[in-house]
Image (cartoon, coloured by chain):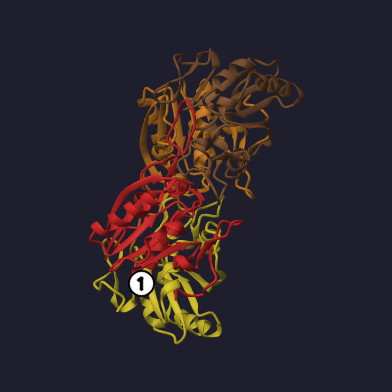
Chain colours: A red, B yellow, C brown, D orange
Amino acid sequence: MKILFIQTGGTIDKDYPKTDQGFAFEITEPAVHRILSRIQPAFTFDVVSLFKKDSQEITNADRAQLKVYLSTRPEQKVVITHGTDTLIQTAKFLGTIPGKTIVFTGAFKPERFKDSDADVNLGLALGAINVLEEGTFIAMNGLVMIPENCEKDPVSGQFITLKDNLE
Amino acid sequence: MKILFIQTGGTIDKDYPKTDQGFAFEITEPAVHRILSRIQPAFTFDVVSLFKKDSQEITNADRAQLKVYLSTRPEQKVVITHGTDTLIQTAKFLGTIPGKTIVFTGAFKPERFKDSDADVNLGLALGAINVLEEGTFIAMNGLVMIPENCEKDPVSGQFITLKDNLE
Amino acid sequence: MKILFIQTGGTIDKDYPKTDQGFAFEITEPAVHRILSRIQPAFTFDVVSLFKKDSQEITNADRAQLKVYLSTRPEQKVVITHGTDTLIQTAKFLGTIPGKTIVFTGAFKPERFKDSDADVNLGLALGAINVLEEGTFIAMNGLVMIPENCEKDPVSGQFITLKDNLE
Amino acid sequence: MKILFIQTGGTIDKDYPKTDQGFAFEITEPAVHRILSRIQPAFTFDVVSLFKKDSQEITNADRAQLKVYLSTRPEQKVVITHGTDTLIQTAKFLGTIPGKTIVFTGAFKPERFKDSDADVNLGLALGAINVLEEGTFIAMNGLVMIPENCEKDPVSGQFITLKDNLE
């Protein structure tokens, strides 16, 4: 099995690199590298950084560029990490791409944090992509969902679905 | 979606609770509680501790007890955490149980460790169980496998498969 | 031994609490609580939150308020956590307060981070305050320094001193 | 400032390196390396591994060897990491060594653990060694103590002292 990981940015990849004159989190290297280093992956993979943007800064031009980029890649299985605020929007924009199984995930706490959800979420995406056939999916809060049935609860921030299965 | 988590023991749940007169890791509370506390689960679940044994201490009597226990539970989806040395053996022993989707996982480093693989592995099991229909599966090292096609590499310790899919 | 811990803000206390509509590190509860929970302290202590400000937002009015506040407290030993950019300035502003041993510390990475320096730095301040008599000191980068001999290297961000001792 | 760190073993350095056929915590590389990598030390140092033993396996022959080893080293400031069960005993055995400031520390949870006390304890030893003159000291549970006044509470495991100062 070969998986392509694409970084678009978002909380999952935020770090705190500065040590002088000011303070800021910054989106740096893909956290996917650090997460995979913990599991001895028994699959092959490639990690590509396409954007380093917060979710709210992702434009439809970016989404179109992502779609074009995907068409240039031979991999069938793709995990895309994305900021949570517009993750559903980007997943819907892509829609189903023939021959591709795409799973979106992200995190509410940066992977750098001790209590981050990043590792579980990436694992969730991996578990889904092992099994799923063609389609574009969202893996968050322990659920694997299709974008049309998924919404982000404005109070809790959770990704939820009203459907009990992927149909 | 409702998921039942069953603790059987293994490295994933090892802690280091003593502070005086000696030293020992011990298998304590299910790490599943701590892992799920990081992700705001959007599903319902129950966590049961059936054994607190190292993998090599699990007997066929234990496996039979596990199989009986599963038959008493109404949940269709079950994640079982297990020590890695005999995880495949226990999964094969159970076989397919009608009406149940069962996913085994575990960890090479205790969840208490900073560099543990526990979070990714549990996420992997969750991602698989969202999607899979009836059957018994193994989720380790980023792969979702059926027990008959899965083996543990004696050198790297990795769970690997020679098949590229779940058929 | 009784120690008073005073929060003024800074990187050490930054968290990432929002889950919807936007993103930001925010200064929240004092990290001192979490750090001390890891060590079973054999001393008594109190933790007070005076400010939740980034170092660069601390004004001389704040510093004067801190000085007045210290005079109202009976504790002889005080550890002050502070952002790193103006930590030296605040320590110099306070100067020596008769009857008080004051140690400033902070962190380059939030305590929430896996690779934070917060635990070591707070330990450093504690080790110094156990031993030191009256005076105001800075504990950072493994060194205990008097403010007049301490400077922050603009390139590395490190707190350094040209003196080899505390005289 | 130059500090020599000496590993003797103990919980602080325990890791979980095996991935196949069995399970065990083992004492591996000095955790001091990993802890110091988090703080950008502004002092020079050397790290030496003398033993990799649990506290209860340290013999008086080992203690004598440690004492001889110290006499061969030019450094004035020495931090010794040690298992907690016989740490006080070893510190008393060494006694005061002319021209040396020696601080013993250790941990109740391995440094590899998320909730380890190792970072605070090593910071505590560093803070003490910055300030202290000749003598042999113990830095644990937030206190800096002389061995004669220090005891380990058999219930809590804490290192405590009945004296409020280092006299």
Report the residue that reaches farthest toward the bottom. B98
Is D50 situated left or right of C147 in this image?
Answer: left
Quarter of the N terminus of chain C within the rendering: top right
Q: Residue at x 55, y 20 (%)?
A: C88
User: In which image quadrant can residue A103 be found?
Assistant: bottom left
The reply, left or right, for residue C146 in relation to residue B150 is right
The residue shown at (52%, 45%) is C23
- Can I make out residue B110 in this image? no
> Which residue corresponds to the image point at 49% horizontal and 80% vertical from the top-left?
B66
| Residue depicted at x 47% and y 40% | D82
Q: Please indicate whether residue B5 sits to the left or right of residue B96 in the image.
A: right
From what the image shows, is residue C32 above or below residue C71? Answer: below
Q: Is residue D91 above or below residue B5?
A: above
Q: Secondary structure at mark 1?
A: helix
Residue A15 rendering spot, x and y as whole percentages: 44, 41
Dot 1: within a 10 Å radius of its alpha carbon, few (fewer than 14), some, or many (20 or more) residues?
some
Of C101 and C159, the residue lying toward us? C159
State the image quarter where residue C94 is shown: top right
User: What amino acid type is highlighted by mark number 1?
Assistant: Val
Residue C163: tell me if it is visible: yes
Please provide percent x and percent y for residue A113: 49, 46
x then y, percent, for residue A108: 51, 52
The residue nearer to you, when weighing A9 against B87, is A9
Residue C32 picture location, percent across and down: 61, 38
What residue is pinned by disc 1?
A: A131
Chain for mark 1?
A
Q: Is residue B18 above or below residue A165?
A: above
Total marks placed: 1
